[in-house]
Amino acid sequence: MKGEERLIVPLMTMIDYRGYRILAQAFIQLGETSLIYGSCDAGKSFQHPKLKKAQVSNSPEIGKADREQEVVEEINEICKKLNLKEHKIKTKIPVSIFTPIDLEIHSASFELP
Protein backbone atom coordinates (compact mmCIF):
# COMPACT_ATOMS: atom_id res chain seq x y z
CA MET A 1 0.00 0.00 0.00
CA LYS A 2 1.36 3.44 -0.92
CA GLY A 3 2.07 6.02 1.77
CA GLU A 4 -0.64 8.39 0.53
CA GLU A 5 -3.24 5.66 1.03
CA ARG A 6 -2.10 4.85 4.59
CA LEU A 7 -1.83 8.44 5.78
CA ILE A 8 -4.71 9.45 8.02
CA VAL A 9 -5.32 13.06 8.99
CA PRO A 10 -7.88 14.30 11.49
CA LEU A 11 -11.04 15.91 10.16
CA MET A 12 -10.71 19.69 10.25
CA THR A 13 -12.39 22.75 8.81
CA MET A 14 -11.91 26.51 8.78
CA ILE A 15 -14.95 28.58 9.68
CA ASP A 16 -15.23 32.30 8.85
CA TYR A 17 -18.08 33.97 10.72
CA ARG A 18 -18.68 37.73 11.07
CA GLY A 19 -15.01 38.64 10.86
CA TYR A 20 -13.77 35.77 13.05
CA ARG A 21 -11.90 32.75 11.81
CA ILE A 22 -11.94 29.46 13.69
CA LEU A 23 -9.99 26.32 12.86
CA ALA A 24 -12.01 23.37 14.15
CA GLN A 25 -10.43 19.93 14.41
CA ALA A 26 -11.84 16.57 15.43
CA PHE A 27 -10.57 15.30 18.76
CA ILE A 28 -7.93 12.60 18.42
CA GLN A 29 -6.66 10.51 21.28
CA LEU A 30 -2.93 10.94 21.75
CA GLY A 31 -0.90 9.24 24.43
CA GLU A 32 2.29 10.36 26.12
CA THR A 33 4.30 8.06 23.85
CA SER A 34 2.29 8.36 20.61
CA LEU A 35 4.56 11.04 19.07
CA ILE A 36 7.00 9.31 16.69
CA TYR A 37 8.18 12.28 14.61
CA GLY A 38 8.28 16.03 15.10
CA SER A 39 8.09 18.44 17.98
CA CYS A 40 5.26 19.01 20.42
CA ASP A 41 7.00 21.95 22.13
CA ALA A 42 7.63 24.40 19.25
CA GLY A 43 10.99 22.90 18.30
CA LYS A 44 12.67 22.73 21.72
CA SER A 45 12.90 18.95 21.36
CA PHE A 46 12.48 16.67 18.36
CA GLN A 47 11.38 13.05 18.02
CA HIS A 48 12.69 10.95 15.13
CA PRO A 49 13.07 7.16 14.74
CA LYS A 50 16.83 7.60 14.13
CA LEU A 51 17.18 9.25 17.52
CA LYS A 52 15.10 6.55 19.23
CA LYS A 53 17.03 3.77 17.49
CA ALA A 54 20.28 5.10 18.92
CA GLN A 55 18.75 5.05 22.41
CA VAL A 56 17.19 1.56 22.24
CA SER A 57 19.70 -0.51 20.29
CA ASN A 58 19.62 -4.14 21.53
CA SER A 59 16.08 -3.69 22.86
CA PRO A 60 12.65 -5.14 21.89
CA GLU A 61 11.71 -1.58 20.95
CA ILE A 62 13.98 -1.86 17.90
CA GLY A 63 11.17 -3.43 15.81
CA LYS A 64 8.88 -0.54 16.67
CA ALA A 65 11.62 1.92 15.68
CA ASP A 66 11.94 0.15 12.32
CA ARG A 67 8.18 0.51 11.68
CA GLU A 68 8.36 4.16 12.68
CA GLN A 69 11.27 4.66 10.26
CA GLU A 70 9.07 3.25 7.46
CA VAL A 71 6.43 5.87 8.27
CA VAL A 72 9.04 8.64 8.09
CA GLU A 73 10.25 7.31 4.72
CA GLU A 74 6.67 7.40 3.41
CA ILE A 75 6.29 11.02 4.62
CA ASN A 76 9.60 11.88 2.94
CA GLU A 77 8.31 10.46 -0.36
CA ILE A 78 5.16 12.58 -0.08
CA CYS A 79 7.30 15.66 0.66
CA LYS A 80 9.47 14.97 -2.39
CA LYS A 81 6.34 14.86 -4.56
CA LEU A 82 5.40 18.26 -3.11
CA ASN A 83 8.92 19.53 -4.00
CA LEU A 84 9.83 20.27 -0.38
CA LYS A 85 13.55 20.60 0.20
CA GLU A 86 15.43 18.40 2.65
CA HIS A 87 17.21 20.28 5.43
CA LYS A 88 19.27 19.39 8.50
CA ILE A 89 18.27 20.09 12.07
CA LYS A 90 20.48 20.27 15.11
CA THR A 91 20.00 17.25 17.36
CA LYS A 92 22.35 14.89 19.21
CA ILE A 93 22.55 12.79 16.03
CA PRO A 94 22.42 14.74 12.72
CA VAL A 95 18.98 14.32 11.14
CA SER A 96 17.72 15.54 7.78
CA ILE A 97 14.00 16.25 7.40
CA PHE A 98 11.68 17.52 4.66
CA THR A 99 8.93 18.80 6.94
CA PRO A 100 8.70 21.75 9.30
CA ILE A 101 10.19 20.86 12.68
CA ASP A 102 6.89 21.36 14.52
CA LEU A 103 4.89 18.94 12.36
CA GLU A 104 3.67 16.07 14.53
CA ILE A 105 3.25 12.46 13.40
CA HIS A 106 1.66 10.14 15.95
CA SER A 107 1.23 6.39 15.92
CA ALA A 108 -2.38 5.24 15.74
CA SER A 109 -3.80 3.30 18.66
CA PHE A 110 -6.16 1.33 16.41
CA GLU A 111 -5.92 -1.06 13.46
CA LEU A 112 -7.09 -0.03 9.99
CA PRO A 113 -9.41 -2.27 7.97
Image (tube, helix red, strand yellow):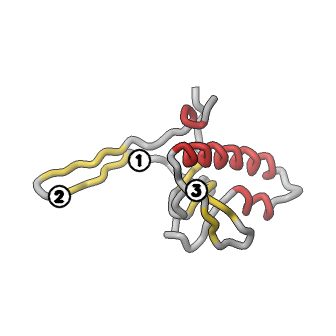
Q: Secondary structure at mark 2?
A: strand
Counting residues from the N terminus, which is met first, the one under dot 2 or under dot 1? 2
Q: Nearer the viewer, mark 2 or mark 1?
A: 2
Query: Which residue is tagged 1?
Result: 27
Residue at image position (57%, 54%) is 31
Depicted 81 relative to depicted 47: above or below:
above
Residue matched to label 3: 98
Q: Compared with residue 5, is residue 88 higher up or lower down, i.e. above or below?
A: below
Count neighbours of disc 1 (C-alpha within 10 A) and say few if under 14, some if 14 to 19, many if 20 or more. Answer: few
When asked about the image quadrant of residue 5, the answer is: top right
Residue displayed at 63% across by 43% down: 74
Q: Earlier in the sequence, mark 3 or mark 2?
A: 2
The amino acid on which the numbered mark 2 sits, given as a three-letter code, is: Tyr
Seen in the picture, residue 14 relative to 94 is either above or below; the reply is: above
Residue 48, picture quadrant: bottom right
Quarter of the image with the C terminus is top right
Position of residue 64 in the picture relative to residue 81 (left or right):
right
Question: Measuring 36% from the left and 48% from the top, which residue is drawn there?
Answer: 25
- Residue 100 horizontal/vertical position (percent): 52, 61
Q: Three-letter amino acid code at disc 3?
A: Phe
Name the residue: 65% across, 73% down: 90
Image height of 29 relative to 40, above or below: above
Mark 3 surroundings within 10 Å by alpha-carbon count, few (fewer than 14), some (14 through 19), many (20 or more): some
Q: What is the secondary structure assignment of the residue under circle 3?
A: loop
Q: Hey, which residue is sitting farthest left in the picture? A: 18
Tell me where residue 22 appears, x and y as whole percent: 25, 54
**Alpha-carbon span between mark 1 and mark 3:** 26 Å
Between marks 2 and 1, how big is the CA–CA gap? 21 Å
Q: CA distance from mark 3 to mark 2?
A: 32 Å
- Label 2: which residue? 20
